[in-house]
Amino acid sequence: EAQVTQNPRYLITVTGKKLTVTCSQNMNHEYMSWYRQDPGLGLRQIYYSMNVEVTDKGDVPEGYKVSRKEKRNFPLILESPSPNQTSLYFCASSFGLPGDTQYFGPGTRLTVL
Amino acid sequence: AQKVTQAQTEISVVEKEDVTLDCVYETRDTTYYLFWYKQPPSGELVFLIRRNSFDEQNEISGRYSWNFQKSTSSFNFTITASQVVDSAVYFCALSTSYDKVIFGPGTSLSVIP
């Protein structure tokens, strides 16, 4: 089954404790992206990747890191989480933009205390 | 600059009523793509439709229909004979370049039985 998976689905952590949210897709997509969803703001792009070893900042990259060492995986790293990073996070993938449809993972709800 | 506006923050309708969700976009590009996504209470993002800027034909899929008007930069979504299962947050999105998709803030639709 074609899908984008994310883990964990729910995470409660404390300020400053490094964490990684994994994202994996099995559709051989070249483009992958991370978004955060906050009430009233829709989805905002954090980072994206056009291909292996190619990543770039989106609209809200501060406090986040990513890597793309393999085509299928695109982990999101929070080196020192803060409460303002409490949000719902989505990973997405597609063959490319602008015309290809993005497919989204199930979301990761992160709470930083 | 690109922008997507969904002026209706929340809408409530009684089951079987028709409802239209508005989406207005801004772009100077002549080639662009528009999307609608549904986010049910379970939280996942479900792709509904993709439209490119050269195709102004309206589309109907069952109870769903979309009206794309370049003259008013709008891509509105109508649900006919709404059902409780239509209760969700609906996002309109715009893609004009290789790196990002811009989402509107979303419209929360509640269908009351």
Image (tube, rainbow, N blue to C red):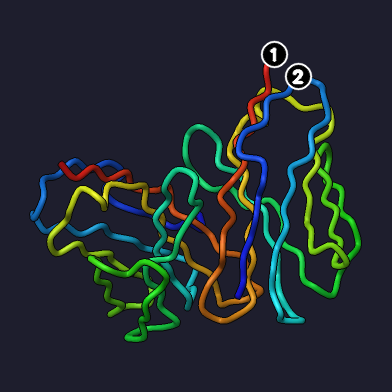
Give the labeled residue for mark 1. Answer: B113
Please give the label number shown on residue B98. Answer: none
Residue at the image position 77 percent from the left and 70 percent from the top: B52
Which of A50 and A111 lies nearest the eye of the viewer?
Answer: A111
x and y percentages locating residue A97 in the rendered image: 58, 77
Question: In the rendered image of this protein, does residue B9 appear above or below residue A6?
Answer: above
Q: Residue furthest right?
A: B57
The chain identifier of the residue carrying mark 2 reads B
Q: SS at mark 2?
A: loop
Does B93 sit left or right of A20 as displayed? right
Give the residue drawn at x 17%, y 53%.
A82
Nearer to me, A51 or B90 = B90
Amino acid type shown at disc 2 = Glu
Say left or right for B8 vs A74: right
Q: Secondary structure at mark 1?
A: loop
Which residue corresponds to mark 2?
A: B15
Name the image quarter holding the C terminus of chain B: top right
Q: Is residue A20 left or right of residue A60?
A: left
Residue B12 is situated, as x and y percent measured from the top left of the image, at 68, 25
Query: What residue is shown at x 11% (from left), y 50% (from top)?
Result: A15
- Does residue B64 appear to the left or right of A33 in the view shown? right
Q: Quadrant of residue A101?
A: bottom right
> Total marks drawn?
2
Q: Position of residue B22 (x, y in %)?
A: 74, 47
The amino acid type of the residue labelled 1 equals Pro
